[in-house]
Amino acid sequence: MRYLMSLILALHAGVALASDYDPQKVIYHINYKDMSRFHHTLANMANHIAALGEDNIELKAVVHGEAIEIFMQATEDEELQITLDAARFNGVEFIICGNSLTGYQITYEDLYDVTAEDVVQAGLPEIVKLQQEGYFYVRP
């Protein structure tokens, strides 16, 4: 819960600095299940949004491989649900790899708050496609 409050405060504290940056389109690449690293990535995203302001950033996070397990775990972990909800509320769009779902023998319905529209066929080609559309790649 302490992490969630830090995330929310970081998002609201940086609004005054938003004019220092041009609008950005960014992809965060997440393919790890280490929760400490995942929380640091969410903090990076929150800081990024805070620095630019919500209206000046399009932030997508492509989730594949072992990171799928985080969204599986969130179906039963209320604190993790709150964390993911806060990221979404602040503009993070999670994109889920369909190949990873197939590899885990699950569907998007087995993940926390994921819809069919959130799923793409393959995560890595989606990253390249987004780069071709002008998104910058970040891998924390």
Image: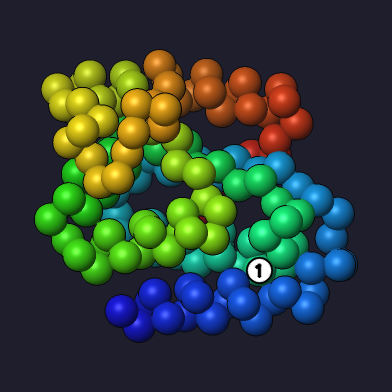
Q: Horizontal and vertical percent for residue 47?
A: 61, 68
Q: Horizontal and vertical percent for residue 25?
A: 71, 42
Q: Name the residue carrying label 1.
A: 50
The amino acid on which the numbered mark 1 sits, given as a three-letter code, is: Ala
Residue 97 visible in this rendered orientation of the protein: no
Quarter of the image where one finds residue 117 = top left
Query: Where 7 falls versus 107 (above or below)?
Result: below
Query: Where 84 falls versus 28 (above or below)?
Result: below
In the shown orientation, is residue 2 left or right of residue 137? left
Placement of the N terminus among the 4 image quadrants: bottom left
Q: In the rendered view, how is the structure colored?
A: rainbow
Query: Where 88 falls versus 26 (above or below)?
Result: below
Q: How many marks?
A: 1
In the shown orientation, is residue 87 left or right of residue 60? left
16 or 61: nearer the eye?
Answer: 16
107 or 134: nearer the eye?
Answer: 107
Residue lying at 74% horizontally and 62% vertically, measured from the top left: 52
Residue lying at 49% horizontally and 24% vertically, measured from the top left: 124
Q: Secondary structure at mark 1?
A: helix
